């Protein structure tokens, strides 16, 4: 498959992730859209690694997954902590710091 | 460009996986129930694992399924279950202007990426046009001697990239400690 198809597919997935972040108001679904964006970038890295026959792209994907796992753990702990106080996960209602 | 591709297994699998990935991603963004969104994201992750296998990356595909679909999404589902979230209220869909502006931003972003990758209609310069100029074949399926198997990635990880590897382990430790502290209940002494 030509490389361009993989790049276009990953760009589409990234755009869908951005749409999810902007359009949804549930904090957990926003977080899942961020994970979708990270996965789209992973696909770009692996496609370039396969195209240039270089393993560095796949190793970078490994580190992106490590960072995504740590980020999900901390982010979900944050959401749980906020839910305990505000009893909601809708980002429209978490506006205590709004001026 | 589509019509002069060989109809072999790789092409069929590419289109099958891309249809599954895009469809599940769109459904994940649009569905009201967060549990369904998580399940659709798991379907997308499995389609991406299929792509990684097509791209000579079996180790990355296995780690992807084990870590993402097996740990991260399970964590998401646990949190959704523990917070006992109901569906999004159907009447509070948000202002129309906000949704229109967000949709416009996404369309502009995708058009920008399409122009960058495919080349603009005016000049024809894009990633697709510059790749042959660098001297590389345009994504041929010839992959002799290149395999992203566990031994090759392990050899790279433990010699050239040993420092990022150790830093990644420290980062995971920080993530564990931070998550436990943030989610802990205050002890009522």
Image (cartoon, rainbow, N blue to C red):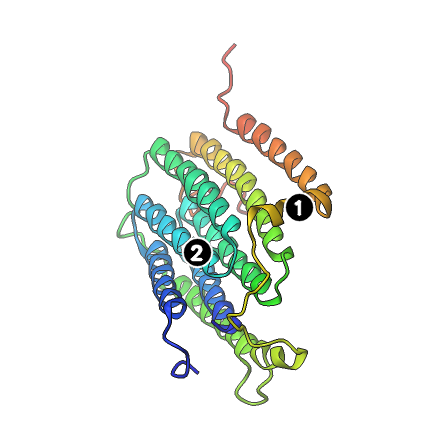
Q: Which mark is residue B140?
A: none
Q: Do the residues labelled 1 and 2 touch (CB within 8 Å)?
A: no
The residue drawn where x is 44% and y is 83% is B1
**Nearer to us in this view, B92 or B46:** B46
Asked where in the image residue A55 lies, by quadrant, the reply is bottom right
**Nearer to us in this view, B81 or B89:** B81
- Tell me how far mark 1 sits from mark 2, CA to CA: 25 Å
Q: Where is residue B81 in the image (x, y as percent from the top left)?
A: 34, 34
Q: In this view, does B39 lie above or below B105?
A: above
The tally of labels here is 2
Q: In this view, does B187 lie above or below B94?
A: above
The residue drawn where x is 40% and y is 48% is A29
Q: Position of residue B77 (x, y in %)?
A: 37, 38
The residue drawn where x is 56% and y is 56% is B147
Q: Counting residues from the N terminus, which is met first, the one under dot 1 or under dot 2?
A: 2
Q: Is residue B133 above or below residue B68?
A: below
* Chain containing the residue with disc 2: B
Q: Residues within 10 Å of mark 2 (few under 14, many from 20)?
A: many
Q: Position of residue B183 (x, y in %)?
A: 50, 28
Give SS at disc 1.
helix
Q: How crowded is mark 1: few (under 14 residues within 10 Å), some or many (20 or more)?
A: few
Residue hosting label 2: B48
Q: Position of residue A37 (x, y in %)?
A: 49, 56
The residue drawn where x is 45% and y is 71% is B107
Residue hosting label 1: B155
**Nearer to us in this view, B127 or A27:** B127
Q: Residue farthest to the top?
A: B189
* Chain containing the residue with disc 1: B
Q: Is residue B13 above or below residue B50?
A: below
| Mark 1 or 2, closer to the camera | 1
């Amino acid at each position: 498959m030509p490389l361009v198809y993989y790049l276009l597919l990953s760009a589409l997935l990234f755009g869908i992730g951005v749409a999810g972040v902007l359009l949804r108001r549930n904090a957990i679904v926003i977080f899942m859209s961020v994970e979708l964006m990270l996965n789209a970038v992973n696909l770009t890295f692996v496609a370039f690694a396969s195209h240039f026959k270089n393993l560095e792209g796949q190793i970078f994907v490994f580190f992106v997954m490590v960072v995504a796992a740590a980020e999900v753990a901390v982010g979900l702990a944050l959401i749980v902590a906020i839910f305990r106080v505000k009893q909601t996960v809708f980002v429209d209602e978490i506006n205590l710091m709004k001026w | 460009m589509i019509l002069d591709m060989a109809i072999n297994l790789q092409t069929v699998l590419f289109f099958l996986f891309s249809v599954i990935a895009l469809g599940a991603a769109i459904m994940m963004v649009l569905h009201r129930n967060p549990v369904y969104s998580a399940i659709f994201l798991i379907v997308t992750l499995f389609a991406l694992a299929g792509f990684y296998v097509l791209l000579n990356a079996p180790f990355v595909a296995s780690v992807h399924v084990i870590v993402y679909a097996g740990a991260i999404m399970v964590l998401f589902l646990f949190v959704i279950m523990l917070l006992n979230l109901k569906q999004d209220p159907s009447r509070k869909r948000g202002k129309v202007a906000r949704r229109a502006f967000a949709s416009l931003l996404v369309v502009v972003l995708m058009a920008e990426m399409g122009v960058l990758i495919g080349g603009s209609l005016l000049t024809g310069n894009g990633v697709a046009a510059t790749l042959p100029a660098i001297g590389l074949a345009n994504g041929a399926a010839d992959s002799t001697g290149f395999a992203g198997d566990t031994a090759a990635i392990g050899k790279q990880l433990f010699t050239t990239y040993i420092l990022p590897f150790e830093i990644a382990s420290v980062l995971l430790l920080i993530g564990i400690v931070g998550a436990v502290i943030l989610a802990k209940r205050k002890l009522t002494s």
